[in-house]
Every structure is written in C-alpha cells, then in structure tokens.
C-alpha cells in the first residue's frame, strides 16, 4: 500500500515537473545553460488532486497530498465519511473530479465497470494541462484513447505504472510521447 502510494505520487511529480524530459535532454547533450522557463512544468503545490477509488492506496495518496497543500477530491462507488473526518477530502462525482483536477490518480479494481473507465469521453472532460496517473490496472485506461488525448493536447501528461497489455509492446505509440512516462510494474 505505502510503496504504491509513494510511486503514484512520485510519478505525478515526474510528469508535472518534466523530470524525464530533462534527463533525456542532459543525456542527449541538449542542455547547455540555465534558463528560467526550461522544463518548468506545472506546479504541484496548491493544485487539485482527483483520486478515483479511495481504497487503501487512494487514501495513502491523499495523505501525501496534504503535505503539498493540495485540494483533494475523490470519486468512489461509496462515500468515505470516516476518511473525510481525518483528512480534507471532498467527495464528488466523476465528471466534477475530471473537470476540476490538475492531477487524476487512479486506484480502482479492474472489473467490467472499470474496464476502459478512462476513454475518449473521460479525457475530453479533463483540463488540457491535467496529468493522469494509473497505478491501478492497465485495462482501466484505454491505451488508444490515452495516446490520442496526449498527442492532441486534450490532457497534459500521463504516468503509468501499469499498461494494457503488460508488458507494453516496444512499438506502442505511447512510448513515442515525451508527455507519457511508463515504468515497469
């Protein structure tokens, strides 16, 4: 639980702060001097985090977000008033979560209801700078829809701890995108 929550938060920060792009630039000899806006990325502190699935892992991600003064929204099949009593969490429906969140962290079980939960329709509801983090199961995200959303600028970035299929094929178009970070599950 804790390791997955740590990884989820780390992935969010890697994409937000464009760490992977910066590492590649250094390795390719493209970084020559400091520039105030070079690989700036987006602010994590004070932003809005939407958690889809507030189980054990989702709750631990929410705890980490409080250290960054993030506004935390969550959507789940049930409301978790006990968690709301412990942390500054707001229960919202999925549409509001997608509309309001700068970061969306996914922590649902894979089921017929959650298969391709993130698809063209859901990506269209997200902010154009939003970052999706999937540390749940690969098939929760439609990979073709994710590719289109990232390529067309419908969302700002994605970080995947899981893929569909797993392991990801080396010719998968997601691997060609700078705004998509994929790590081994």
Image (cartoon, rainbow, N blue to C red):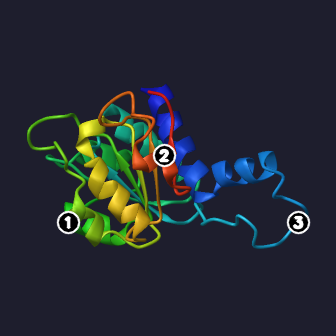
Q: If you read the primary sequence from the N terminus, does the residue marked by circle 3 or circle 1 appear first?
A: 3
- Left or right relative to 127: residue 20: right
Name the residue that disc number 1 marks.
121
Name the residue that disc number 2 marks.
175
Question: Label 2 neighbourhood size at 10 Å, few (<14), some (14-19), many (20+)?
Answer: some
Name the residue that disc number 3 marks.
34
Compared with residue 133, is residue 69 higher up or lower down, i.e. above or below? below
Q: If you read the primary sequence from the N terminus, does the residue marked by circle 2 or circle 3 appear first?
A: 3
Depth check, front residue: 172 or 83: 172
Compared with residue 127, is residue 89 higher up or lower down, i.e. above or below? above
Q: Give the CA distance from mark 3 to mark 1.
A: 40 Å
Question: Label 3 neighbourhood size at 10 Å, few (<14), some (14-19), many (20+)?
Answer: few
Question: Label 1 neighbourhood size at 10 Å, few (<14), some (14-19), many (20+)?
Answer: few
Identified at 58% across, 55% down, the residue is 68
Q: Position of residue 86 (x, y in %)?
A: 38, 45
Quadrant of the rendering where the C terminus is positioned: top left
Identified at 36% across, 41% down, the residue is 58
Q: Position of residue 120 (x, y in %)?
A: 23, 63
């Amino acid at each position: 639980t804790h390791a997955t929550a740590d990884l989820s938060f780390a992935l969010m920060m890697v994409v937000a702060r464009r760490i992977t792009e910066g590492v590649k630039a250094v390795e390719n000899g493209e970084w020559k001097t400091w520039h105030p806006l070079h690989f700036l990325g987006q602010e994590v502190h004070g932003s809005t985090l939407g958690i889809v699935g507030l189980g054990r892992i989702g709750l631990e991600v929410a705890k980490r977000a409080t250290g960054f003064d993030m506004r935390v929204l969550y959507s789940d099949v049930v409301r978790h008033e006990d968690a709301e009593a412990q942390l500054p969490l707001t229960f919202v429906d999925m549409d509001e979560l997608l509309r309001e969140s700068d970061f969306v962290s996914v922590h649902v079980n894979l089921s017929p209801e959650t298969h391709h939960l993130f698809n063209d329709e859901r990506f269209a509801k997200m902010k154009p700078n939003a970052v999706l983090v999937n540390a749940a199961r690969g098939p929760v995200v439609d990979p073709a829809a994710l590719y289109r959303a990232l390529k067309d600028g419908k969302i700002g970035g994605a970080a995947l701890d899981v893929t569909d299929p797993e392991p990801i094929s080396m010719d998968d178009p997601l691997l060609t995108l700078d705004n998509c970070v994929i790590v081994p599950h």
